[in-house]
Amino acid sequence: MSQNAFGPSPFQKMTNLFSQWDSLEQRLAQARTIALFLDFDGTLARLQTRPEGVLLHKDARRYLHQLAASPRFRLWVITGRRQADVASRIRVPGIRYLGLHGWEGRLADDLPEATLVALACLKRQLQARFTNQEIWIEDKHAALAVHYRSALQRVEVFEALQHFIEPFQDVLHIVQAKNVLEAVAHQIADKGEAVRHQMATIRNSTLPLYVGDDFIDEPAFRALPYGITVHVGRKRRTRARYWLADVLQVHQLLKRLATQFT
């Protein structure tokens, strides 16, 4: 029932993106259009204990303004957050915000009644099960996110969620991300599908550049084998070809893109 972020294709041997900048610079310079896909939490902005505490640094906002205003760039932010939430935190016109892993802003059809009933029932069960303030439930309308802090809590949350979701497995599935497990409506696919859909709407000469830090970004890395894919954070098994150490290095990347290619 849990969504597998990986699959049959091989993992990449990552190299630091800046160590390969000369060759990447040539690819970027030759591209007529650059499709820049960005995750938000842990990529554009530092992770915080609770999602409402996450803020975008003013420098990153300035670079995004420059990129969004450039005719060479198309910008998307694809996030597990709700679309309105991430748009209000970034506040840059010209970016297309895709919430709930790409569902909001692309499809966002009304959910079937059975799915809404299942989510409401699951929410009541989870709220009754977890009264500890260190484990809390976030209602995203088409998904329920259960946030936790420790590895032990992760096991506890996963076992409870797996048990409670059993009667609803025909309409809900589990998605795993950093310090959060989500019960998600089946209508919500992964970021890979969202990226493929967006790339199909623009011309073939476009070079995709995707930057993300989480396991839920892996389907997008897999969907762009011909693009520049960047994992943010510690080195791990991933399909991304390149890596950056942290959010500050992502901001450095945005600065280089805005300075050299707009």
Image (cartoon, helix red, strand yellow):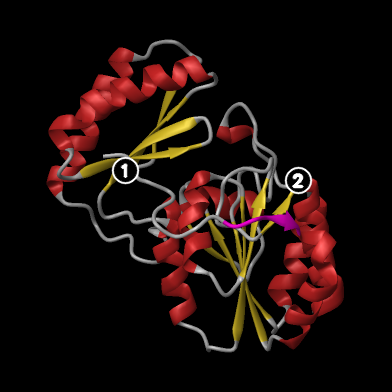
What residue range appears in magenta? 12-16
Q: Nearer the viewer, residue 243 or 161?
A: 243
Instruction: Say which residue label 1 marks.
Output: 184
Instruction: Say which residue label 2 marks.
Output: 245
Residue at (85, 73) in percent of width and height: 22
Figure check: 54 above or below 28:
above
State which quarter of the image contains the N terminus: top left
Give the alpha-carbon distance from disc 2 to disc 1, as whole Å. Answer: 30 Å
Nearest to viewer (mark 2 / mark 1): 2
Q: Position of residue 153 (x, y in %)?
A: 46, 17
Q: Position of residue 116 (x, y in %)?
A: 20, 42
**Upstream in sequence: badge 2 or badge 1:** 1
Where disc 1 sits, the SS reads: strand
Left or right of 127 in this view: 28: right
Q: Position of residue 261 (x, y in %)?
A: 80, 78
Left or right of 145 in this view: 33: right
| Residue 57 painted magenta | no
